[in-house]
C-alpha cells in the first residue's frame, strides 16, 4: 500500500536565498510557503522562479510555534509551476535539515492537523 504524502497547505512569508547557477551570485528574495512536509517545501516566488537543481537556502519561522525556533533548510529545486499573476511555485526537496528543525516541522504538521480535526 502506498503511503499518502503528508503536507500542510498554509501560506506564510519566508526569506529565501539561493545561488544563481549562471552567475554564482547570491540572490535574496521574499517567498511565500504554500505547502510544507517533512521532505520539502513549495515556495511561491514572483517572476520566472528558480531553475531546477539549484541549491536553495531558506530560513523561516513556522506560525504557531513562536519565533524562538528559526527553521533553516538547504534543498534543491525539483519542479516549477507557473501560477497566475506572474508568480511561480517552486518545489524544494530538503537535502540538509537539523533534527531539531525536522522535529519542529513535524510538530507544526501535527498541530495543524489536530486543529483541522476539531
Image (cartoon, rainbow, N blue to C red):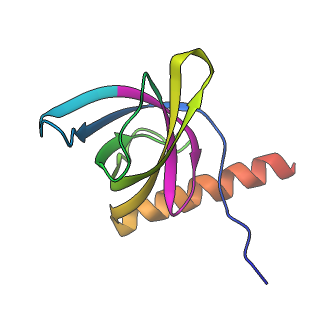
Q: Position of residue 2 (x, y in %)?
A: 75, 78
In the rendered image, the quadrant that contains the N terminus is bottom right
| 64 and 55: which is toward the camera | 55
Residue placed furthest toward the top: 85
Q: Position of residue 17 (x, y in %)?
A: 27, 36
Q: Position of residue 29 (x, y in %)?
A: 32, 26
Looking at the rendered structure, the number of numbered marks drawn on it comes to 0
> Splitting the image into 4 quarters, where does residue 67 fall?
top left
Q: Is residue 9 left or right of residue 38?
A: right
Vertical side of 99 occupied by 35: above or below: above
Residue placed furthest toward the bottom: 1
Asked if the magenta segment contains residue 17, the reply would be no
Vertical side of 87 occupied by 116: above or below: below
Magenta region, main secondary structure: strand
Q: Position of residue 81 (x, y in %)?
A: 56, 38
| 38 and 18: which is toward the camera | 18
Residue placed furthest toward the right: 118
Residue placed furthest toward the front: 22
Q: Residue at x 35, y 42 (%)?
A: 51
Asked if the magenta segment contains residue 40, the reply would be yes
Q: Is residue 18 left or right of residue 9?
A: left
Q: Which residues are magenta?
A: 30-44
Q: Residue at x 36, y 37 (%)?
A: 50
> Splitting the image into 4 quarters, where does residue 3 fall?
bottom right
| 115 and 45: which is toward the camera | 45
Q: Residue at x 54, y 31 (%)?
A: 12
Q: Residue at x 58, y 52 (%)?
A: 108
| 56 and 14: which is toward the camera | 56
Vertical side of 36 occupied by 38: above or below: below
Amino acid at each position: 500500500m502506498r503511503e499518502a504524502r503528508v503536507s500542510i497547505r498554509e501560506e506564510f512569508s519566508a526569506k529565501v536565498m539561493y545561488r544563481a547557477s549562471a552567475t554564482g551570485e547570491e540572490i535574496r528574495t521574499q517567498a511565500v510557503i504554500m505547502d510544507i512536509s517533512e521532505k520539502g517545501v513549495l515556495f511561491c516566488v514572483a517572476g520566472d522562479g528558480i531553475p531546477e537543481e539549484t541549491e536553495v537556502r531558506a530560513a523561516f519561522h513556522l506560525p504557531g510555534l513562536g519565533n524562538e525556533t528559526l527553521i533553516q533548510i538547504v534543498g534543491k529545486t525539483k519542479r516549477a509551476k507557473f501560477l497566475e499573476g506572474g508568480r511561480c511555485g517552486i518545489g524544494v526537496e530538503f537535502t540538509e535539515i537539523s533534527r531539531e528543525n525536522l522535529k519542529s516541522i513535524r510538530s507544526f504538521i501535527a498541530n495543524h492537523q489536530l486543529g483541522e480535526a476539531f
